[in-house]
Amino acid sequence: MNAVVLAVLVMLALNMLRVNVVLALVVGALAGGSVTHLGFSASLASFSQGVGAGANIALGYALLGAFAMGLSSSGVPAWLVGKIKKQLLRSPHKSGQNRFLLLLVIVLIAVASENLVPIHIAFIPLLIPPLLGVFADLRIDRRLVACCLTFGLTASYMLLPAGFGHVFLIEVLARNLQENGLTIDPASMPLAMAIPVGGMLLGLLVASRSYRTTQAPEMTAVPAPTPEEPALPLSKALGAALATVLTVVCQIKTGSIVIGALAGCLTLPLTGVLRLRDSNEVFIRGMKTMAWFCFVMIAAAGFAQVIRDTGAVADLVASSQGMLAHHPFVTILLMLLTGLLITMGVGSSFATVPVLATLYVPIGMEMGLSSLAIAALVGTAGALGDAGSPASDSTLGPTAGLNADGRHDHIRGSVLPTFLHFNVPLILFGWLAVILL
């Protein structure tokens, strides 16, 4: 069996058996590497080397957790939730409309976090935990919330060329296509990805029908009125706003999550949002909330390094080329599934596209595919698995918010729903896009 396939299948099987994700990633990587020329010892060394590459990402996530906890201590999230509850209480008989509006706001905020204010998943620990009670009162299934968050986090960078979308579409996808010999206008990337993203939108609509309500006992549509919404001092509001702006600006200017989060963490005590003597304890609590996710990202980086060092990705793609002449449609499907396997293990579409472009561009040109079709093929194959991967921040982020009270399972609550509702339509619509374009 191909090492990539074996590593991913072992990792996914262990996850389904409720084995810890970090352990599953380690065992999967060693299992895949051990059946190749690397052997067990070299695979372990390769994994250790890859872990270092994930340390910077993990540090960024830990600091984002600290910043989120510090910002939540300002009272801004509680004030925002109070406003939401007050609005819902004005129309308690419109529970269906309230559910729709709340989910729409969550999707739009997730989209903005990728394209307009590129803070990625940093908003989730701030916004989602205070809304858990509202979700219960409106009987919104958390799996549907996970789908809304993941859709906003992934579909936006696949379609909109701004923020992280500019990085994915222009700097990663278009540049790698051109470097591998394909003549194509970078401005046409959104057109190439429009049909696959349309499939994701359809998947979200299906999810909204599948997860209408929770399994909680019968309850009223909205909670009873609360006495008063929390007060928010102007000084704390301004300090929190300044910290948020500096976090975004520093991240954009430096391209570093670490620097952005660090700027926000320093601003909170300096502006009086946090008392200096309390800031250490608050930041430690925030880092603890993100600790598990940091370990997952570190382990995922080690997993990806082993996969690269085995050289099995090229073998996996080459094995599908035998059908090139007589079964081009089957070949396209196999190439998409290969991308799914790689991204499921690596956990990052941004890291998968450069690997696939080197292999898929020459194959696509040999098959006579148009430039747009090749762009759709590589872009979709790279994005497949971002939603639905246990090691992807597009599923880890939603879990970080939805599991704040310990009642949301990462695999069954975030991974499986997003895999079903986004990866399946992405395969079908990505395949259709390559054929039509």
Image (spheres, rainbow, N blue to C red):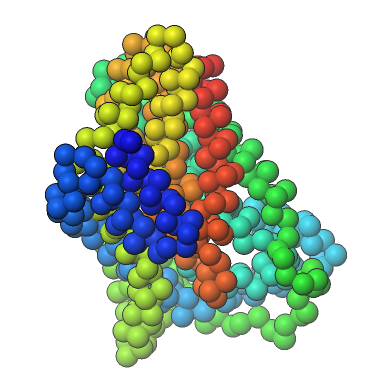
Say which of 139 and 255 sits in front: 139
* Side (left or right) of 308 relative to 215: left
Asked if residue 256 shows in the view, the reply is no
In the rendered view, tell whether residue 418 sits above or below residue 217: above
Q: Quadrant of residue 106?
A: bottom right
Extreme residue toward the right, this view: 93
* Side (left or right) of 106 relative to 193: right
The residue sitting at 28% across, 49% down in the picture is 31
The residue sitting at 42% across, 63% down in the picture is 19
Say which of 182 and 419 sits in front: 419
Percent coordinates x, y for residue 133 in the rendering: 65, 73
Say which of 293 and 87 sits in front: 293
Give the total of numbered labels: 0
Asked if residue 384 shows in the view, the reply is yes
Q: Quadrant of residue 181?
A: top left
Percent coordinates x, y for residue 279 in the rendering: 34, 84
The residue sitting at 33% across, 24% down in the picture is 319
Say which of 9 and 107 sits in front: 9
State which quarter of the image contains the N terminus: top left
Percent coordinates x, y for residue 298 in the rendering: 28, 59
Q: Quadrant of residue 268?
A: bottom left
The residue sitting at 24% across, 24% down in the picture is 179
In the rendered view, tell whether residue 312 sits above or below residue 360: below
* Side (left or right) of 344 relative to 201: left
Percent coordinates x, y for residue 427 in the rendering: 52, 32
Extreme residue toward the bottom, this view: 277
